[in-house]
Amino acid sequence: MTKERTELATPYLSGLLEFWLTKSVAGRPPVPSSIAPADLRPWKDNIAVFEVIGEESGTFVYSYYGRALAAAFGQSRLGATLDDLPPEQRALLQPEYETVRRERLPVARVHTAVFGGRTRSFERLVLPMSSDGVSIDKLLVAAYEMTPRELAARPPMHSPAPGSSSGPIPLTVQKPGASA
């Protein structure tokens, strides 16, 4: 299955997506064990890893939480679940993560909200991983704050309601691991 790919504004996210594609084999998302912690060094401070527990509507547990994310959002979420987030955050993230599980493809979006008393925008990328090649049991999520210049240079995608984030951006992935 091919999804339309919109260029990511953040070079680090583009690099992470390319890395994820190199670890995908035979049209399947990467197996978590194929990714060594050292492989993620360029992104380590800006990623969170979720363990997905349950088949249908899964429970998402933070198993890794990068230092830059903890600094940006005022705390580490290591060991917490999405259920521990405020309802408005959970309502935004849960459907997105369920979509990534169901579609088995990456999703990206820009989220703008008030964080720490000021309006900030983050470009996010959610990448599925599967230990058995069937179920998505981990999500690798990366987020980078965007500068006003990056936001201004970014082409408009949608017209979201004021104060909300833009919706998920479909990304071109020709069956993960397939060559273009």
Image (spheres, helix red, strand yellow):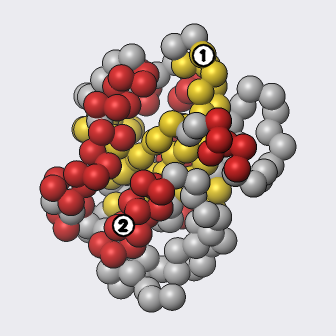
Between 114 and 129, the residue placed more toward the observer is: 114
Badge 2 crowding class, 10 Å Cα cut-off, few under 14, some 14 to 19, many 20 or more, is: many
Badge 1 crowding class, 10 Å Cα cut-off, few under 14, some 14 to 19, many 20 or more, is: few
Provide residue 120's location: percent of width, then percent of height: 59, 27
Provide residue 93's location: percent of width, then percent of height: 54, 37
Q: Is residue 67 visible?
A: yes
Q: Which residue is mark 1?
A: 118
Pick out the residue farthest to the bottom: 179
Assign a secondary structure to mark 2: helix
Assign a secondary structure to mark 1: strand
Q: Amino acid at mark 1?
A: Arg
Instruction: Check the image and report above or below for 93 versus 174.
Output: above
Give residue 20's mark.
Answer: 2
Pick out the residue farthest to the front: 149
**Left or right of 150: which side holds 82?**
left
Q: Amino acid at mark 2?
A: Trp
Between 107 and 82, the residue placed more toward the observer is: 107
Between 152 and 35, the residue placed more toward the observer is: 152
Instruction: Check the image and report above or below for 179 versus 23.
Output: below
Q: Is residue 100 visible?
A: no
Instruction: Check the image and report above or below for 49 versus 28.
Output: above
From the viewer's perspective, is the residue at label 1 or at label 2 nearer? 1
Question: Which residue corresponds to the image point at 61% horizontal and 63% vertical from the top-left?
Answer: 7
Question: CA–CA distance between discs 1 and 2?
Answer: 32 Å
Between 6 and 91, the residue placed more toward the observer is: 6
